[in-house]
Image (cartoon, rainbow, N blue to C red):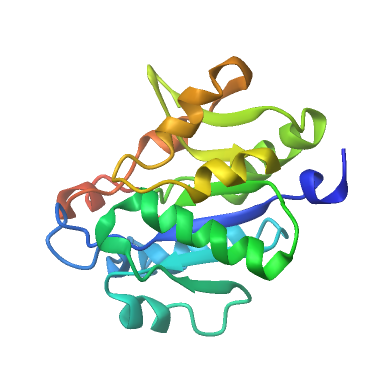
Amino acid sequence: MNASNASPVVMVMAAGASTRYGSAKQLARLPNGCTLVRHAAVTAIETGLPVQIVIGAHGELVRAELIGLELAIVDATEWWRGVGRSIAQGVDALVARVGKPTSVLLTLADLPQVTSKDLLRLAEMHRQSPDRLLVSGFGDNRGPPCLFPADCLPALQKLDSDDGARGVVKANAERVVAVPLAAAGFDIDRPSDLLKMPPT
């Protein structure tokens, strides 16, 4: 195990057009007044791990919400091709910047109940078993936050659809570990979902 495998980069996806939400979901405000995207970015930064955020649709508005935060911002210029393409562009930028493969802890801007402790739990499990692909488990569902080992990056770079990274997870089924993470089961798809959020 090398250092790049032991310390993942947190990659926050915030590039979508939010068609189901009806407006720029990234700018939706939580009960505490913080926007979804800034909340997700701050949560990632609180882990102490390096952070990269991928923006696309509503790019300049989203970028303005990240002023003053210590993270790398990547513009997914082909966000309209789907979240898979945005992930691929994010990983391309990460590899170009870091210069060598590193593990990626992939999370979404619309998971407001996921905490820095949740992300650190995945990172610690990765340190113990660096070859495992970790996914969050909630009920019968599996999804992000997910932690991809370094050798999965080439597959992530080939993504080009709206199905996210599900294909990469499926192709590595024999080494996938589902981590119980109830907070990952609550995402924001529509404005009404915000009414279900407890104050933070």
Count of numbered labels shown in the rendering: 0
Residue drawn where x is 36% and y is 75% of the image: 62
Residue drawn where x is 53% and y is 30% of the image: 135
Residue drawn where x is 60% and y is 21% of the image: 177
Q: From where the camera sits, is residue 200 visible?
A: no
Image coordinates of residue 29 in percent, x first then y, are 30, 66
Residue drawn where x is 87% and y is 44% of the image: 2
Residue 164, compared with residue 69, is above or below; it is above
Instruction: Specify whether 106 is left or right of 150.
Output: left
Quadrant location, the N terminus: top right
Image coordinates of residue 115 in percent, x first then y, are 55, 48
Q: Nearer the viewer, residue 79 or 17?
A: 79
Residue 64, compared with residue 9, is above or below; it is below
Residue 56, compared with residue 6, is above or below; it is below
Q: Nearer the viewer, residue 170 or 28?
A: 170
Q: Nearer the viewer, residue 16 or 93?
A: 93
Instruction: Specify whether 98 is left or right of 6.
Output: left
Quadrant location, the C terminus: bottom left
Instruction: Specify whether 182 is left or right of 126.
Output: left
Residue 74, compared with residue 143, is above or below; it is below
Image coordinates of residue 190 in percent, x first then y, are 17, 51
Q: From where the camera sits, is residue 27 visible?
A: yes
> As drawn, which residue projects farthest toward the right?
2
Instruction: Specify whether 148 is left or right of 1.
Output: left
Image coordinates of residue 33 in percent, x first then y, are 35, 70
